[in-house]
Image (cartoon, rainbow, N blue to C red):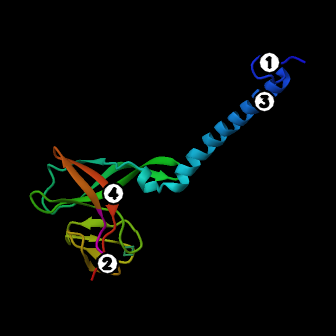
Amino acid sequence: MAVTEQSGVPASVARRRFYVGMIYGLWSLIASALSIPAAIYLLIPPKLRRLPEWAEAGDVSKLEPRAPVEMVFRQNRVDGWKIQSEKTTAWVVKLGDSQVVAYGPQCTHLGCAYRWDDDRNYFLCPCHTSVFSVDGAVVSGPAPRPLDRYEIKLENGRLLLGELHQSKEKA
Ligand code: FES
């Protein structure tokens, strides 16, 4: 039986120890490769993982005061592991010289799409006839709260939209 020079351990035992060590090393490598992403997914809330994103909605320099315009834009949505790009809209209104607001496209009652009525100067929801004023407040109908608003940023006349914030219940 061959004996290694330094340790006095037979070569076959040393070789076996080496292979066992290699196998344990590979196992721990595979276990870490599987468990680290799983731990990040389970322990870190999705909101912290998501970078704040701004979507460009369009040019607001030519908006007429208090005349809402529906703007179409693309937004990324995180769905579990997937990030989906989807088309959505915002109703954008210039309320004052430097005040622009962007409302979410869904009625705050049951989520129907509402529209701006030029003749009546109100947002109207066809589903259960909720009516909202140009500043998003509920005028009548079953809607429990004003229109939701996007976080906005203006850069050289371009409107950037961030997260949609749910409005508070009307008093
Ligand atoms: S969904 Fe708009 S009034 Fe019901």
Of labels 2 and 4, earlier in sequence is: 4
Q: Mark 4: which secondary structure? A: strand
Are the residues tagged 2 and 4 within 8 Å (C-beta)?
A: no
Q: Earlier in the sequence, mark 1 or mark 3?
A: 1
Identify which amino acid the numbered label 2 is placed on. Glu
Q: Earlier in the sequence, mark 4 or mark 1?
A: 1
Q: Which residue is mark 4?
A: 163
- Across and down, in percent, residue 8 comes to 80, 22
Residue at x 50%, y 53% (from the top left corner): 79
Q: State the extent of the magenta-drawn residues as a range.
A: 144-149
Find the residue positioned furthest to the right.
1
Residue at 77% across / 32% down in the picture? 20
Q: Quadrant of residue 15?
A: top right
Image-based side of 88 in relation to 170, left or right = right
Write the residue at 33% across / 57% down.
Answer: 163
Q: Alpha-carbon distance for marks 3 and 4?
A: 57 Å
Q: Which residue is mark 3?
A: 17
Secondary structure category for the residue under label 2: loop
Give the CA separation, mark 2 to mark 4: 19 Å
Instruction: Provide the secondary structure element on which disc 1 rests.
Output: loop
Closer to the camera in the image, 37 or 132: 37
